[in-house]
Each structure stands twice: as structure tokens, then as C-alpha cells.
Amino acid sequence: MSEPVTLVEVTRGPFVESRHFGHAVIVRSDGEIVEAWGDPTRIVLPRSSAKMIQALPLMESGAGAHLSQEQLALACASHSGEQRHVDKVSDWLTELGLDEHALCCGPQVSRDDALREDMIRRRLEPSRIHNNCSGKHAGFLTLAKHLGASLDYVDLDNPVQKAVRRAFEETCGEESPAFGIDGCSAPSFAASLTGIARAMAGFAAAGKGHSARDKAMVSLREAMIAHPELVSGKGRCCAALMYAAKGQAAVKTGAEGFFVAILPGLGLGVALKIEDGATRASEAAMAAILVRLGVVEAENPSVEAFLAPRIENWDGLHVGDVRACRTLLD
Amino acid sequence: MSEPVTLVEVTRGPFVESRHFGHAVIVRSDGEIVEAWGDPTRIVLPRSSAKMIQALPLMESGAGAHLSQEQLALACASHSGEQRHVDKVSDWLTELGLDEHALCCGPQVSRDDALREDMIRRRLEPSRIHNNCSGKHAGFLTLAKHLGASLDYVDLDNPVQKAVRRAFEETCGEESPAFGIDGCSAPSFAASLTGIARAMAGFAAAGKGHSARDKAMVSLREAMIAHPELVSGKGRCCAALMYAAKGQAAVKTGAEGFFVAILPGLGLGVALKIEDGATRASEAAMAAILVRLGVVEAENPSVEAFLAPRIENWDGLHVGDVRACRTLLD
């Protein structure tokens, strides 16, 4: 096992004030590693970066056959809890004959400044629908109802999680050693970083077969690419990189410095983990890898905003920069 | 130069999900290193951990002779922008015949939930007085007026910053190679981590001499120890550790994973830097070092809250833990 390597530096004045170490791997659809940094065998919890895998049983089972592409994007989303996200998930629950109380994810404050402040002024508490994972949970509920299973769908023994685990292990090509409980109370199954990238390469290569999995992978990948701001939100890194990639990438962030990419044109999958869990670093590192692979351009301002964000202080002065290391770019 | 070492781990389920690397050093008042982890020669920007050094010229010059102990605590503070902090800094500016527009620090939203929400409801914008550094800046203004200097007190050529740099280099025992601009627009002078710890050991040992510096160090150290919640805020790590140490420690956090401690009873200074800049790690590491040195007890719940904080998810489930590594504790 090799140690993590420096992937991102944070400067202030003439100094490198902080450094982020991590691991990254690019995998072909045949499962072979194209390039790796740090330790691609590191066992990781992909957290929200696994949402497209967690949505596979919804589609493979036929439970999601009637869902709109927007709903599929939300099933794969860590959304910002903007009004449009809340409204669409709310409508989805109504279609199921359910309401927010059926969601197992806890309440979370909206990331949308205007909505959050409006709710404070109106003394409204955040609901479970505002939780960034509420679309994924609506997908879990849709599958649970289709299977006639208990609606306690985050339980490890529930048919929903059994199907998720099976899809996870099959797409990663590994048995999952164990799991952690995610921010939204669903299990986050563990795999090697290469396993996660292998699953993403599977999504990238899908479209040539006729299996339920092949079709599910294409549906979810295309839904993400068609609706970048439903997968994330206005101004967010996932949306910026997907817009910049113009259909050549479906990308997804995860908590604790995780990030994955599905690159259909290249038939590649990417997974990276910042060892310390920092989002500023996972975003810069993923932007750099997409630049390296020619999927986005470093000069595109909406890429640059995450590849090399300026650090401004409370008075708006430019005091430092976050920058991906040359080892990722060259 | 040695690499940083693992100081803090973050677990989820059976896994170490993330790790924080860093450097730490404990120094005696004669400047000798007692113990070190990682690279004690790393050149660092101490950020807000240097506030007691930045306040030395205020006291040594006599400019602060009339200030209350509460004002001295605020001069060393990264306060939470609670109403009491805002009121006291506001009164201080009035004493100087000035108002918030004299502050060079930018406006910052209060960390106090109730005040922040109240301001949103009343559609009030945060002011420069809410900035966590406003007490330090009131101190700079007090010194600038005393010296008859321009009130552009964050300029490197202003007599205020010249005096700060001199005090910084003398207490660290090193020439500062350069500086970065801090979040509040003041220069943050660089030194080695050992240099910063040496300065803190100087504060710890002060009280035996008759120099203006010796007296200034005692005044500032004792003001911090007497008013932990003015130096930080309700529920904050600095306050919790200072209360738990019962007069045996003055501690101060800084941005980008910095933390220092002045330990008068032991005559020791401590400085640590988390390489990735994470506050959760700098807090756990400082708590661990204070436990190691016998200054606080690990079993004290208010210490444990920072030494080994539980990670709870959006639904309040205990899903993981932050924990300082045994290398710091044993």
C-alpha cells in the first residue's frame, strides 16, 4: 500500500500554506488501470459518488420505467435543496402516495441562500425533502413499493439495500468488505478506489448491450448529463464540469473528498479520494483530471473556478489560490 | 525536511475514512524542543494564532495601559461575533472617537446562530465589527492613534505593522522570510513552527522580569485565561480547553489548521499545523497534546467534545468519530 500523494496545494502570499494528499485512478472499461496516483487499492467509502450505482436496481427492476429523466437525475443527485429540487421531489412523493415523513434522510438546511434566508424569515424549519439526498430516497421508496418491500428501505436486510449491494459489488467487480452509515442514514458500501472507478468505466462503456443493466446505466448517465443542475445545483462544481464537458462527462461529488467521473466518449471511469476529506481539493483534482483527459478546457472560466479558485478574504482581496498539482495536469 | 505525520483520523463504521497529517512541536522557554511530530522546521503562517504577538506593541508602547482586561482578551480574539463581542468592540471604537468604518477588516457574518438569524429577519447586513478579528483591529487602531501614525494600520510600512513584525521576529527568535495577507487584511508574518512555539514559550515563562515585554506578555496571557469566551465564543474549542485547564493554559486557534498553546505552569509553548488546513483536526490534536501534558483531562466532556468528537448525521445518528492518534497521546 503506497501513501497518498500531494494532489492540491493552497497558496497564500509566496507560501504553500496547506497541501492536500490523495489518491486517484483512471480505469478502462475492461477494468484495467490507465493511470493512478497514490494508492488505488485504498478501501474507500464512496458516499454520494455511488448514487448512480445505488439507482441501478430502481431501473433494472422496471420500477423506474415510468420516471421522467428529471426524476432519474434527482435519484443520482446531491442537490442544493433549491425550490425546484424540493418541488420535484415533493411531487414525486405525491405520485407514490407518500409525503416527506416516508423519507429516512434527516432534515437539512437548504444550500440556496435566498431560500434559506426566506425560510428563516418565515420561521420555517428545513424538512427531509430539503436533504441533498431526498431524490435518491424517493428512488429507494419507488423501488421498495415496486418490490412490495417494507418502507424501512435503509435497513441492510431490506430488499432495496440487498439489491443495491449486489449492483455495487457486481459493477465494482469486488466483494464489499463492510459499510458505513451515510449522512442520509443509507449504507455506504466500501470498495477499493479502483473498484469504484471500474464501476464508473462500466457506466461509460454502456450502450452497446441489451441487458437491463446496460440500459439502466445509459438511462442514468444520460439523465445526469441532461440535467447537471438537478444533480447538484446552481453554481456547483458538478454542474460546472458537466456543462463544460458538453455531454462528454457525468461527474458526481461525494462527502469526505470523494469524486467520480463517467467519460462515455473515452470509455473511461475516474475515482478520487482526498485523504483529509476536503471538498476544495476533490473539486480541483477532478477538474484537473478532466483537463488532462481533454474533456474540459482549463481556460473555460467555469472550469477555472474549481481548478484554480481564488481565495478572497472578508474584504474581497485576492490573498491566495487553490491549485491542482502539475502531477495531475502534465 | 521530514514529511507531515498522521495526527488525527476520522472513522465511519469499521473504516478510517479520512486522515489528517500535520506537524506539532513543544518548546521550552529556553527555546529547546521538548517533543516534535512531523517537521518542526516547516515555514508556516500562524494566522490568528499570532494575535497575542500582534498585541504586544499595543502593551509595550503604553498605548494599551488604560485598556480593560476584557479589551485585552478581545485584542487576542477570534471571536464569534456574538452580541457581547460586537457591543464591546463597538464601545472601544467609540472610546477612540471612531466607528466601524475605521476597521480594515471586511464584514463577516456572525457565527452566533440566534444573532445571525435575527439579523436576516431584520434584513441587517453584517458589519466589520462582526468580523472575528475586530478586537485585534481595535487594538491596532489604539496603537496607531497613540503613535500618531496613519490609520491605514494594515499597511506593511505603517509603524503599527513595523512594530508587530519586530515583536514577531524577536519572540520567534527568527527573521520572518515574508508574509501572507490574512482574512482580515493584516499581514500574517511567516516563521518556522518551532519559532512560533518558541514565542508561546516566551509568553508561558513571562512574569519573572521587569521589561515592558515581560509585563505585556503577562497581561495578555492573563486576559486570555480570564476571558475564554471573549477570546473565542460560547461552545468554541479555545474556550472549552481554557476552562478545562483552569488557568494552566492560554490557547488560540488560527485559520488553515493552526493552533498554539501557552502553558505558564509548565513553562512550555506549543504550536501545531494541520497540513491540509482542517479545523476539526487542529482542535483534536491540540486537545490531545494538552491531555498528554496533563493540563486537561481526556474524560472531561468539554475536552472530549474536541478530542474525540462524534460525527452525527442529518438524522442525529452516531455514524463515526474524529480521534487524535495515539502518537500524540501516549
Image: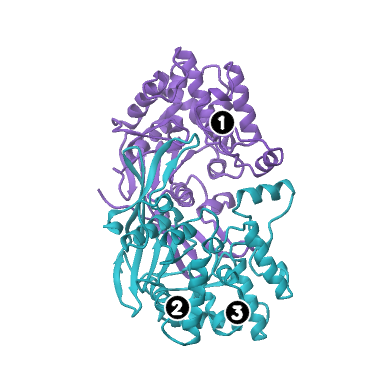
Chain colours: A cyan, B purple
Which secondary structure, mark 2?
loop
**Cα–Cα gap, marks 2 and 3:** 29 Å
* Most foreground residue, A298 or B173: A298
Judge from the rendering whether residue A327 lies leftward or rightward of residue B202; answer left or right. Answer: left
Tell me the CA gap for discs 1 and 3. 52 Å
Question: Looking at the picture, how far across and down is residue B11, in whole percent?
Answer: 48, 64
User: What numbered label is drawn on residue A177?
Assistant: 2
Q: Is residue A221 above or below residue A291?
A: below
- Up-down: is B119 above or below B166? below
Q: Are marks 2 and 1 in contact (CB under 8 Å)?
A: no
Amino acid type, label 2: Pro
Q: Quadrant of residue B149?
A: top left
Left or right: B91 in relation to B170: right
Element type at mark 3: loop
**Residue count near mark 1 (Cα–Cα under 10 Å), binned few <14, some 14–19, many ≥20:** many
Relative to residue A271, is residue A74 drawn left or right?
A: right
- Amino acid type of the residue tagged 1 in the rendering: Arg
Q: Residues within 10 Å of mark 3 (few under 14, many from 20)?
A: many
Name the residue carrying label 3.
A64
- Counting residues from the start of the chain, the first of labels 2 and 3 encountered is 3
Nearer the viewer's eye, disc 2 or disc 1? 1
Helix, strand or loop for disc 1: helix
Mark number, residue B128:
1
